[in-house]
Amino acid sequence: MSEPRNDLAIDGEGLVKRFGTFTAVDGLSLQVPRGAFYAFLGPNGAGKSTTIALLTGIYRADAGRIHLLGRDLQANPLEVKRLIGVVPEDLALFERLTGRQYLVFCGRMYGLTSDEAEKRTEELLQLTELAFKADSLVADYSKGMRRRIAIAAAVIHGPGVLFLDEPFEGIDVVASAVVRELLKELKRSGVTLFLTTHVLEIADKLATHAGFIRAGKIVEAGTVPELLERHKATSLEDVFNVVVGSPVAKGAKLSWVSGTGT
């Protein structure tokens, strides 16, 4: 196994994860430079969420090694987890707290002083445009608001890497715009972002790097300009269609549908 590289935020090599006889992640290797905005793309069931679970220590790999910010995840899981933030697709929030209480609680759990947790909470409420709902219960938040408060909670301790699993799933246009601006600000601040998304238009606008996964394996990866040049493409959707496969139903016809209602 190679030594940790300090220029990489995420360095995974030969990762394998099996569930019984099914191999969800199959010898996967990826490298994400510090400060990158990495879009991790692939069809449903390709292994994206399982890979994030491995990289964040939720699952333990059956084989391979993971270095995050130059530290060995398997050898130092608690140390590494203090340095990262995670926003899963299925949010688990403390709904009987107000938004303000929830963020202060998360900050205190990460070891911030009471004053620092409260200061960062106010900054994040402004940044996520949730100040007007700060004293409402999280249970009363819309899906987009819940996504924003989850991101705020994941970054309140100042992580070096933020993992986001489908952050744009099921949210409206307004919430999507707020999340995009929040992610841009995090990138400007030097945070490495690693996200999965099915909204390839957003990946085109935000990502600096991308990796494509199919059947638990990385099939293509690189900077966005490299990928576009390599495949003579104008968008990541074009690259996706080449390396992962365009929709099977494209051009399909239904012989029994006439449009006449008969």
Image (spheres, helix red, strand yellow):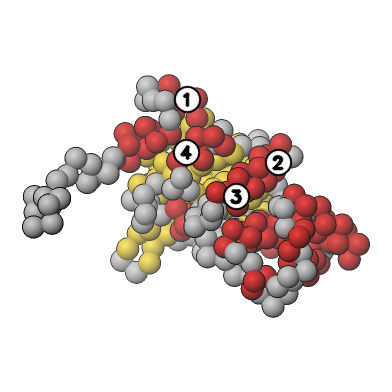
- Seen in the picture, residue 234 relative to 205 is either above or below; the reply is above
Identify the element where label 3 is drawn: helix
Whether tag 1 and tag 3 are in contact, CB under 8 A, the answer is no
Mark 3 vs mark 2: in front = 3
Q: Earlier in the sequence, mark 2 or mark 4?
A: 2
In the rendered image, which residue does mark 1 sit on?
A: 226
Q: Which amino acid, by three-letter code, is at mark 3?
A: Val
Identify the element where label 2 is drawn: helix
Q: Is residue 129 left or right of residue 75?
A: right
In the rendered image, which residue does mark 4 sit on?
A: 201
- Cα gap from disc 1 to disc 2, whole angstroms: 24 Å
Given residues 252 and 82, the one toward you in this image is 252
The percent coordinates of residue 127 (x first, y second) are 75, 49
What's the mark number on residue 174? 3
The percent coordinates of residue 124 (x first, y second) are 77, 54
- Seen in the picture, residue 45 relative to 31 is either above or below; the reply is below
